[in-house]
Amino acid sequence: MITDVGEAFQAARDAYAANANGPLALDFGLKTLFATNEGDLLGRDFLRKLKALDETLSGIARHVQRSGRKPRTSKRYVRHAERTRGYIRTELNRIINRLIATRRPSRLFLERLNFRSSRFSRQMNRLLQNCGRSVLQTKLQALSDEFGIETTEVVSAYTSQTCSCCGYVDKRNRPSQEQFSCKWCGNKMHADVNASRNIGSERFRSFTVLRPGIRKAVLDVLVSEHIERNKRRRGSPSDPRETNPYFEDWKPEVRFLPLAASCEWQKGV
């Protein structure tokens, strides 16, 4: 039996659009699964649970390999791998559903997701990459079909090092995994929230196509824009850009007094 759901989906899209709240930007991580430009931190237990699953998965794999067999020939390994896939699938869908229910975004901006991590075994990384990407793509397509929520992938280069307020890019802006502290304007916030705000900002939205040399192109734009916005008079306080390798080619132009920058987050970003 074939059922035409076109009219039902159109009605759902119209109802959703009438109460949508504008675009939402997402930063993906494993310690915090998703952070939004609104300050939400979702899936903060994801990494801990995956590490526990990985210990069991890699332990079974080592035991099977010592007997000269491949892990996929073990029924116990296969069962545990399926359990891991089930957890990844459930958690991703749960969090996306919660975001849609609470934030009601009209559009999603997110980075191109890489589910791999050096913290996990080869087996877990393979499961994460294959299962995680497939589940997320399927979910995003379902949101588009049912609610008309379109998704735009943004190049994530330097989003974790760039201040979402003043646009200053520096490795030292992120002293720890969770902390962001701008060397230029003093902006402080959770590092994942800062990254998500960059992903949703105009300065990164234009970089939507992955191509060779894209990281350098992004850095060149960030550096040149910051120089143009912050040409100041010479002064005695040190300019953090003078010791920043990203500004190496611009040193003659960065010897200015870094005044406090305005950090107001703009609505609609």
Image (cartoon, rainbow, N blue to C red):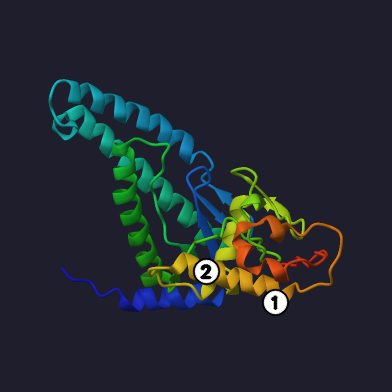
- How far across and how far down the image is residue 257, in percent? 82, 65
- How far across and how far down the image is residue 200, in percent? 57, 68
Closer-to-camera residue (99/218): 218
Could you tell me which residue is drawn at 44 percent across and 68 percent down? 214
Could you tell me which residue is drawn at 60 percent across and 56 percent down? 161
Closer-to-camera residue (66/43): 66
State which quarter of the image contains the N terminus. bottom left
Q: Which mark is residue 218?
A: 2
Could you tell me which residue is drawn at 36 percent across and 65 percent down? 142
In screen coordinates, is 81 left or right of 174? left
What is the three-letter code of the residue carrying label 2?
A: Val
Residues under numbered marks 2 and 1 in contact, where contact means CB atoms less than 8 Å apart: no
- How far across and how far down the image is residue 18, in percent? 54, 77
In screen coordinates, is 164 left or right of 148? right
Let me know if residue 209 appears in the view.
yes
**Residue 115 vertical position relative to residue 60 in the rendered view, above or below:** below
**Residue 170 vertical position relative to residue 3 in the rendered view, above or below:** above
In screen coordinates, is 211 left or right of 256? left
Secondary structure under the numbered disc 1 in the rendered image:
helix
Secondary structure under the numbered disc 2 in the rendered image:
helix
Whole-angstrom CA distance, mark 2 to mark 1, is: 16 Å
Closer-to-camera residue (236/191): 236
- How far across and how far down the image is residue 131, in percent? 30, 49
What is the three-letter code of the residue carrying label 1?
A: Glu
Report which residue position mark 1 lands on. Answer: 228
Other residues around mark 1 within 10 Å, as few (<14) / some (14–19) / many (≥20):
few
